[in-house]
Amino acid sequence: MPLSGQHVAILGAGRSGRAAAALSLRQGASVSVWDAAGADAFAGMPAGVMQHPLATAELAAGAACDLLVVSPGIDTYGPYVAAFARQAAEVIGEVELAARSYTGRIVGITGTNGKTTTTELVARILGHAGLGGTPCGNYGTPFSEVLLQDNPPAAVALELSSFQLETISTLHPAVAVWLNFAPDHLDRYPSVDAYRAAKLRIFDNQTAADTAVLRAGEALPRLAARSVTFSTEDESAEWFSDGHSILQRGVMMLDMTHDTGLRGLHNAENAMAAMAACQPFGISTALMREALHGCAPPAHRCELIRTLDGVEYLNDSKATNLHALESALRSQTRPVVLLAGGKDKGLDYTDLLPMLRSKALACVTFGQIAGPLQQLFGPVLDCQAVATLAEAVSAARALAPRGSTVLLSPGTSSYDQFSGYEQRGNTFRDLVNQLR
């Protein structure tokens, strides 16, 4: 047992923390779990785990350990982790813990936007090819939970956030996918460069035998792995799409319109990245096309809720940053009434103005950042500021003419009024379905 005789301390009692605890116990470690929440947060914790609810930095002195495993929702560089790290021989994350025991092949997927859709597409292709392909990491199942299965899959589609990549050291993707990069999470990182540096760690342990799937035009350092590029703008990229056909070196690989339920340039990029990531496994084009047949975007990602009085209502609540909002706008073919707003993350929306001019006929802002966004967007188009999402949906219906699209693509996180983008998207869905 690789952890036999060692003490593993885990920060965070959520699902990934529970999975890390179970995996560590199975590998022979003594395990303690620490969380600032109360005892209720430890429900479902494996038997044999030492539980420490209401844990504070001051209590960290009693958490001396061989290995400190930090859950991704906890700020790696904050004072809370620093206090526990002083008592630890090594600090890693749950994904790294699992990677040290996994003997299969990893497709690691990162990017500011599109990670979840691409992860789901990769998982579908790998699964259809008989390789398992379980979606895990930042999406789906915690990686440690996958390893607790009786027969772990031969390959996994591992979504990796910057928070998870901060705490890797040996994780080695056979294929690393870099979808895109744009400023985000500036409420956690001191600078854009720090956020980018965290994401670049996905390539740290790759060798010349591995593959890096990259969006063409991304400013990346020299990589050890073989590079494969995709684009919806640069026809010289190895994979290219106009949003309908997907080509590899000029050869038709997928007709998105007829073969899938995916729509828009952003989903074309996701599909190209997924297909390029699965080719190194020897999976044929025909098999990939079968796997993607009828595939539609996951919930909250340009999800069509309904069409009412000739107006489409799209739920893109997953757009928690500007790049995602811009991508959603760019992919629209009908005039847009945009619903944007939420928590103020300190982002600069100025670069969005040209896209608003070309794609949107009106905008309704809501939430904490409603007022500042109205001031910025007002000179460009008709823009109303309201307090809540319910008010925004009502205002948008009045503004949207037949043949247009009401697009919820907030461009920031939801934590001013909701527990997460899922609750925000579900609320939008309910509100739209209640319209008469």
Image: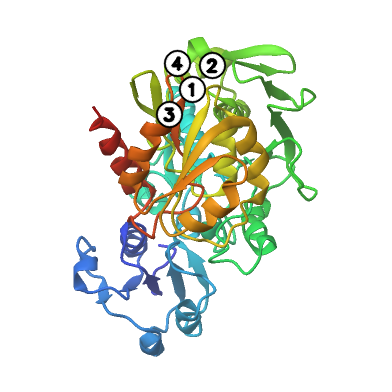
Measure how far apart labels 1 and 3 are at the Cα level. Answer: 24 Å
- Residues tagged 3 and 4 counted as in contact (Cβ below 8 A): no
Disc 1 or 2, which lies upstream in sequence? Answer: 2
> What amino acid does circle 1 point to?
Leu
Find disc 2 in the rendering and name its residue: 256
Is 224 above or below relative to 52? Answer: above
> What amino acid does circle 2 point to?
Met
Disc 2 or 3, which lies upstream in sequence? Answer: 2
Disc 2 or 4, which lies upstream in sequence? Answer: 2
Is 2 above or below relative to 406? Answer: below
Disc 2, SS: helix
Find disc 1 in the rendering and name its residue: 262
> What amino acid does circle 4 point to?
His
Disc 3, SS: loop
Find disc 3 in the rendering and name its residue: 400
Query: Would residue 38 appear left or right of 106 to someone viewing this image?
Result: left
Measure how far apart labels 2 and 3 are at the Cα level. Answer: 28 Å
- Residues tagged 2 and 3 counted as in contact (Cβ below 8 A): no
> Which one is nearer the viewer's eye here, 128 or 327?
327
Considering the image in quadrants, where does the C terminus appear? top left
**Pair 2/4: label in front:** 2
